[in-house]
């Protein structure tokens, strides 16, 4: 008489557990980064076609994804591009807010050039006008 052996393997991912695997976190971050890159490419196409609202929708979702995955570098880049799309859509207060958030993240990451770029977008959004040079 032969008996069938049945085996059941259970696995789950608890990314918030202190002993969660590094590979799982890395994979989640890599996937979120790829989706963010895809969203920035698609949003750039929408902005080139003057569909700023469409770009905002794509970038809003991508920012939420980056935040959920904890990918700060992507979050900063996405918020920076979102602030540009909002500025072009004439949503200045929100554009300034997103630029400020992108700037803060970039500073925290030590990306000073990016932080300066985001600061420039913030200035445009709040209506800063550079003084004219004497001469």
Image (cartoon, helix red, strand yellow):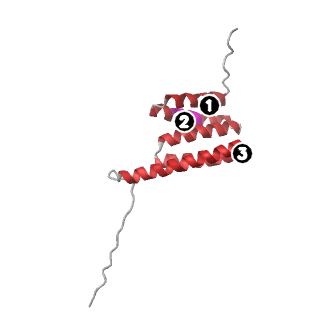
Count residues near mark 3 (Cα–Cα under 10 Å), then give few for <14, some for 14-19, many for 20+: some
For the record, the magenta segment spans 98-104
The answer to whether residue 129 of the structure is visible from this angle is: yes
Give the distance between the C-alpha atoms of the residues marked 1 and 2, in whole angstroms. 10 Å
Considering every residue shown, the one lying at the far right of the view is 50
Which of 17 and 25 lies nearest the eye of the viewer? 25
User: Measuring 62% from the left and 33% from the top, which residue is drawn there?
Assistant: 96
Give the distance between the C-alpha atoms of the residues marked 2 and 3, in whole angstroms. 22 Å
> Horizontally, is 55 left or right of 111 in the view?
right
Q: Main SS type for the magenta part?
A: helix
On residue 13, the disc is: none
Residue, disc 2: 102
At which x and y percent is residue 72?
A: 48, 41
> Compared to 50, does 109 lie above or below?
above
Residue, disc 3: 51
Quadrant in the picture for the C terminus: top right
> Horizontally, is 14 left or right of 63 in the view?
left
Count residues near mark 1 (Cα–Cα under 10 Å), then give few for <14, some for 14-19, many for 20+: many
Residue, disc 1: 121
Which of pointers 3 and 1 lies earlier in the amino acid sequence? 3
């Amino acid at each position: 008489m032969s008996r069938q052996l049945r085996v059941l393997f259970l696995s789950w991912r608890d990314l918030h557990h202190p002993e969660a695997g590094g590979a799982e976190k890395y994979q989640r971050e890599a996937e979120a980064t790829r989706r963010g890159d895809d969203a920035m490419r698609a949003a750039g196409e929408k902005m080139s076609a003057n569909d700023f609202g469409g770009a905002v929708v794509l970038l809003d979702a991508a920012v939420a994804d980056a935040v959920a995955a904890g990918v700060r570098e992507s979050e900063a880049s996405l918020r920076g591009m979102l602030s540009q799309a909002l500025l072009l859509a004439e949503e200045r207060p929100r554009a300034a807010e997103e630029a400020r958030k992108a700037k803060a993240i970039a500073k925290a990451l030590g990306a000073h050039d990016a932080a300066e770029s985001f600061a420039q977008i913030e200035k445009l959004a709040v209506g800063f006008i550079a003084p004219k040079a004497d001469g």
